[in-house]
Image (cartoon, rainbow, N blue to C red):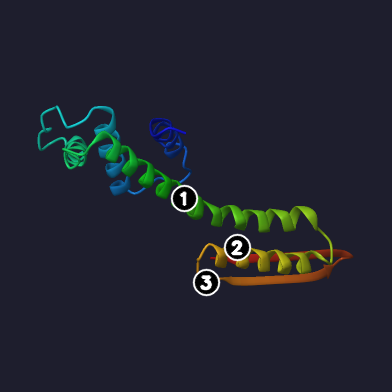
Amino acid sequence: MTLKAEFEQCAENVKKVKTRPTDQELLDLYGLYKQVIVGDVNIDKPGMTDLKGKAKWEAWNSRKGMSNEDAMNAYISLAKETIEKAKVTGAIPDLLLNVHFGASAKYQDSVSSVQFIAVSLSAFLQSLVSLRVNPALKVTASSARLGGVNTNSAEVYL
């Protein structure tokens, strides 16, 4: 893949992240993108009442003199970092939902649901550790037989 093609692919992929990048990441991506597409800043600095426009102009102007190739490489690196960060950040709720819905849908009204939940929580915690997240969890699980019906519940608090 050529540098230009990789740049274009990263520019598309970074738009699809599930979690919003920080304002600074967005400004850095913007400044690098404009440097690649347009080159050095070629417009007047917005007035002091246009805070957003001024911040974007300053992000772009901070790349003044950077070559097209260097700007592309920096953009690709930052975009990949931002995308990876979004994957890690977005993975935790997805894992939690899988544990919760997987347990309730698969083993509803079953004595083994509490066991399944325990196994699912173990897998969930291992996933958190692999993502280098130190979970602070409170887990409660219970099973009871009320009126001839098995009742099971589990709650996970992050």
| Residue at 16 percent of width and 35 percent of height | 50
* Amino acid under disc 2: Ser
Instruction: Give the label, 1 or 2, closer to the camera.
Output: 1
Binning the other alpha carbons within 10 Å of mark 3 as few (below 14), some (14 to 19) or many (20 upward) gives few
Residue 150 vertical placement versus 85 (above, below): below
> How far is mark 3 from mark 2, CA to CA?
14 Å
Callout 3: SS: loop
Callout 2: SS: helix
* Amino acid under disc 1: Glu
| Residue at 41 percent of width and 50 percent of height | 81
Q: Nearer the viewer, residue 62 or 122?
A: 62
Picture quarter containing residue 155?
bottom right
Q: Nearer the viewer, residue 143 or 59?
A: 59
Q: Earlier in the sequence, mark 1 or mark 3?
A: 1
Q: Nearer the viewer, residue 96 or 30?
A: 30
Name the residue that disc number 1 marks.
84
The reply to whether the C-beta atoms of the residues labelled 1 and 3 are less than 8 Å apart is: no
* Amino acid under disc 3: Ala
Binning the other alpha carbons within 10 Å of mark 1 as few (below 14), some (14 to 19) or many (20 upward) gives some
| Residue at 37 percent of width and 46 percent of height | 77
Which mark is on residue 127?
A: 2
Which mark is on residue 6?
A: none
Name the residue that disc number 3 marks.
136
Picture quarter containing residue 2?
top left
